Amino acid sequence: MFGQQVLVLNQNIKRESGRKVQTGNINAAKTIADVIRTCLGPRAMMKMLLDPMGGIVMTNDGNAILREIQVQHPAAKSMIEISRTQDEEVGDGTTSVIILAGEMLSVAEQFLEQQMHPTVIISAYRRALEDMLDTLKEISIPVDTSDRSMMLKIVHSAINTKALSRWSELACSIALDAVRTVELEENGRKEIDIKKYAKVEKVPGGIIEDSYVLKGVMVNKDVTHPRMRRVIKNPRIVLLDCSLEYKKGESQTDIEISKEEDFARILQMEEEYIQQICEDVIRLKPDLLFTEKGISDLAQHYLMKANITAIRRVRKTDNNRIARACGARIVSRTDELREEDVGTGAGLFEVKKIGDEYFTFVTECKDPKACTILLRGASKEILAEVERNLQDAMQVCRNVLLDPLLLLGGGAVEMAVSKRLMERSRALTGVEQWPYRAVAQALEVIPRTLIQNCGASTIRVLTSLRAKHTQENSGSWGVDGETGCLSDMSVLGIWEPFAVKAQTYKTAMETAILLLRIDDIVSGHKKKDKDGQMGGPGAE
């Protein structure tokens, strides 16, 4: 009886547990961090990725790289998730968050080897996180959001690490203008919705310097009838989301006709219906009509006789933007059109041909709450990268407007926080102080990576930076990412929003804690082979 082996888990399930899993997880996290490590700072390298469809992505945005990589290891997957979270929450710092999380785990490795229990490490990490956030709050500096030059500096340091840094003046002002435009204050609540109302339109051709923010909206459409007006000053705009064509019945209906006249009557009814709808529209004397659905030929004829320019099949999102820009309301039925639904806020409507496509511009709006950023560039890849960089810049703007606190960039904050943690660790007793101190060392990974990426001597610069931070009032010193020398960040004007930094620390710590908690991985999937046999233990 005793000699028999008892099977609890299914045969073809892989189970790893204990130390092996923890080292596996830590190695996976380190690998992911190493992929991204060279993408930090102004001297960042680009990565070129081929996606399965054969398209090319060229970028140094942490999130964009990890999105394209396919990984097997579960711990690596959760690392990739955090950069996505960071991107959705604050939009910047996707690279730093991965590097930090990887470093936090790798400093924990030695404690696990010394048989320290993961929960001890975790509680030290938790305490360290709280202290880090407190320190951040202490050293943060409030900022006046109406001061344009200061805002430009903040955006500048966000763009500086990206491919856009050559055109940073242009990019900063584009990002700032766009965010300022879509900013809405309702009953003391600020709402800045970049995704919905600041659309980036990419038009290949031309040069990057031609990009600008429109004081209005652009749609990739042409007028429906060639004889309609293409330029209108101060147009009256009507937005519909119903079609201007004869409605067929929903269910299939058959009409039996016995007399010739009845057929003529049916055609006449269709025409009268369309004429009725068009008259509803013409009653308001608009110059411009946008609809999300189709416009039949007959309706075009009536509208043209009334000298109304019509544009059909506009996207719903574009329609919403036009509504915000010119103050019109979107109407679902023509007979419900009222005078107050007409938008009069736009100053100019024109159709221009860029490249070989026609674009409709509704510009010179009085107080637009939506805008379009028109990007020009040599190739699709460049445009895609520029768009990603602009998104980051706009997110940074938004974060500062919503939470006007600043921190210094260039690794200065990390060093200051690290020093503070070192001081606090002396007050701790027991085993916890070691992992707590390790967090302080892990934070130095950011300035260290910055130095590495410029090709300077890591040990020398980092040691002198540590020495600098022990002096009085030199908490603003960090690494100049361009040259790899020490410099005063407040003089260089490298700032980061508080929201981004806080979120980076929180996310990195939480992930490290999460991955340290895992001590068992059971992976069992049965996959049928081509022959229909069940996969054995080795089948993946």
Image (cartoon, rainbow, N blue to C red):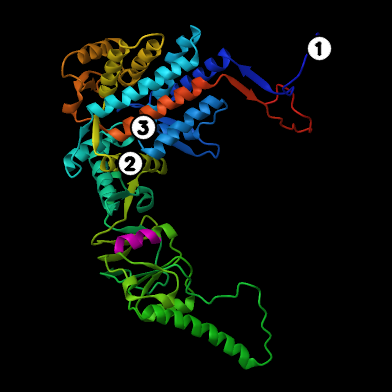
- Residue type indicated by callout 3: Gln
375 is higher (above) or lower (below) than 32: below
Residue pictured at 27% horizontal, 16% vertical? 419
Magenta part of the protein: which range? 319-326
- Report, in whole angstroms, how far the alpha carbon at label 3 lies from the one at label 2: 13 Å
Query: Which of the 4 image quarters holds residue 269?
Result: bottom right
Dot label at residue 503:
3
Reply yes or no: does residue 186 show up in magenta. no
Label 2: which residue? 395
Q: Nearer the viewer, mark 2 or mark 1?
A: 1
Residue 12 visible within the image: yes
340 is higher (above) or lower (below) than 140: below
- The front one of 144 and 305 is 144
Label 1: which residue? 4
Q: Residues within 10 Å of mark 3 (few under 14, many from 20)?
A: some
Query: Which of the 4 image quarters holds residue 451?
Result: top left
- Report, in whole angstroms, how far the alpha carbon at label 2 lies from the one at label 1: 63 Å
Q: Position of residue 346 (x, y in %)?
A: 27, 65
Question: Dominant secondary structure of the magenta stretch?
Answer: helix
Q: Position of residue 207 (x, y in %)?
A: 30, 45
Furthest residue toward right: 1
- Residue type indicated by callout 2: Gln
Dot label at residue 53:
none
- Compare marks 1 and 3 and give the one earlier in the sequence: 1
- Report, in whole angstroms, how far the alpha carbon at label 1 lies from the one at label 3: 54 Å
